[in-house]
Image (cartoon, coloured by chain):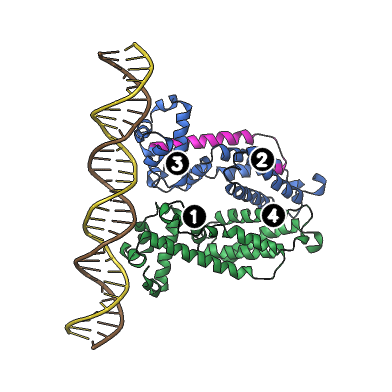
Chain colours: A blue, B green, C yellow, D brown
DNA sequence: AATAACATTGACCGAATCGGTCAACAGAAA
DNA sequence: TTTCTGTTGACCGATTCGGTCAATGTTATT
């Protein structure tokens, strides 16, 4: 990879990264075409190969970029000393939400990369990273104070319900809803709050 | 389309339909290739064009087939006189679950078709059909007895939570879990039962 | 057994698209 | 003017695309 890429104006770099991420999030490694990426980024195809050498080079750069970005964002929310189940969940979801709004293809790309089976890139991607979502979720849960939950509530089930619900919630938002991040978070919180009032013992409400 | 297709042995027909559904569920109309479909179905490419005339013919036949199939299955669960919120949900989800197990690509295909923007087929698919899931869910809700719910539970929110949770639940099942439909349903019911005990007034438990 | 009728194949077609190259160009710096 | 750097897009050979069709396999009829 050509290091000169990093000296490009930020706009141009982002245009290339976003376009490539979008196409790789939408298609297989094999079916994602460099022509389409160049056209979407508004640059010539030659530039892609000038900076990244090959399609594979671009893909692996993108994977590294996305992994670092997500890890960085996750860390911000991971080191709190919060023990309340719902506050932990809401923190991590707020984090995820902002990432989905700012970089809507980043998460999709990194998850798709985990399931990628094209022999050209399969062996070179870090397979431990694909389940980052689940592993961070589980570590969040580890420090949660479960005693606030009613006895007949399974923490694992509750976590899954919230996590899966959140995915569906995000997936079915319209594009314009994604522009107002704050309002979106409020709607999401209404759902979580309803659940919280249902599963917490009365004395914690 | 060549009507002789329907005189084929059921196995062969299903092999072709399933292979085509799988590829069209995985890729765009444009990026789905007839070579891949033929190879997956274990037939020669010539047969596809012999029976369906063209790629477009195959796609539109599949759309019609999937739409009719889903509608038929949905109807079976739609005309009960059940009024219990959770029994209605569980019925419709059991229906959806069995469809996902028997025809794992059918739902994905029909939803993808809704968002298809390839000019060749876009104008010919029935756009009112894509949101069949939501519309049937809403009609289920219409006859539900909401008085059993605690006052601070929003029926719309609860429905969304269950629906989105169910999607995530199904999506994260492993292939071998999908073989034992009954056990799968039991696990699903555990989740729903937990929710039911949380949102129903004590006198209905 | 011979033949007619049908089902199925896979090599093949021209066109399109693929990843990748490179001579040429634009513009700022020297 | 000359040099250097970033950028282009026409172009390459290879592959893949949707689609065709003569040839072959299979079954029913005579």
Question: On the same chain: label 3 and label 1?
Answer: no
Q: How far is the residue under mark 3 from the one under mark 1?
A: 28 Å
Q: Is residue A72 magenta?
A: yes
Q: How far is the residue under mark 4 from the one under mark 3?
A: 42 Å
Among the 4 quarters of the image, the one containing residue A20: top left
Q: Residues within 10 Å of mark 1 (few under 14, many from 20)?
A: some
Q: Residues within 10 Å of mark 4 (few under 14, many from 20)?
A: few
Looking at the rendering, the stretch of residues picked out in magenta corresponds to: A57-86
> Which chain letter goes with mark 2?
A
Q: Are marks 2 and 4 in contact (CB under 8 Å)?
A: no
Quadrant (top left, top right, bottom left, bottom right) of the N terminus of chain B:
bottom left
Residue positioned 39% across, 62% down in the render:
B57
Numbered badge on residue B156: 4
Up/down of A179 relative to B16, above or below = above
Q: Are marks 3 and 1 in contact (CB under 8 Å)?
A: no
Left or right, residue B2 beside residue B90: left
Among the 4 quarters of the image, the one containing residue A205: top right
Q: Which residue is mark 1?
A: B112
Q: Residues within 10 Å of mark 2 (few under 14, many from 20)?
A: few
Where residue A190 appears, x then y in whole percent? 71, 46
Main SS of the magenta segment?
A: helix
Query: Which element is circle 2 on?
Result: helix
> Which chain letter goes with mark 4?
B
Q: How far is the residue under mark 2 from the one under mark 3?
A: 36 Å
């Amino acid at each position: 990879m050509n290091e000169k890429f990093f000296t490009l104006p930020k706009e141009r770099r982002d245009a290339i990264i976003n376009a490539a991420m979008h196409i790789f999030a939408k298609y297989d490694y094999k079916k994602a075409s460099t022509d389409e990426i160049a056209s979407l980024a508004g640059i010539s195809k030659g530039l892609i190969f000038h900076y990244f050498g090959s399609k594979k080079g671009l893909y692996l750069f993108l994977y590294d970029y996305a992994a670092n970005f997500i890890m960085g964002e996750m860390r911000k929310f991971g080191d709190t000393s919060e023990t309340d189940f719902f506050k932990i969940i809401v923190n991590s979801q707020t984090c995820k939400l902002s990432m989905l709004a700012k970089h809507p293809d980043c998460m999709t790309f990194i998850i798709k990369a985990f399931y990628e089976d094209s022999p050209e890139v399969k062996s070179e991607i870090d397979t431990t990273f694909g389940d980052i979502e689940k592993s961070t979720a589980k570590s969040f849960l580890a420090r949660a104070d479960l005693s606030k939950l009613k006895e007949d509530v399974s923490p694992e089930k509750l976590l899954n319900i919230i996590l899966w619900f959140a995915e569906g919630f995000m997936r079915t938002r319209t594009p314009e809803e994604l522009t107002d991040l704050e309002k979106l978070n409020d709607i999401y919180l209404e759902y979580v709050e309803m659940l919280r009032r249902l599963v917490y013992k009365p004395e914690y409400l």
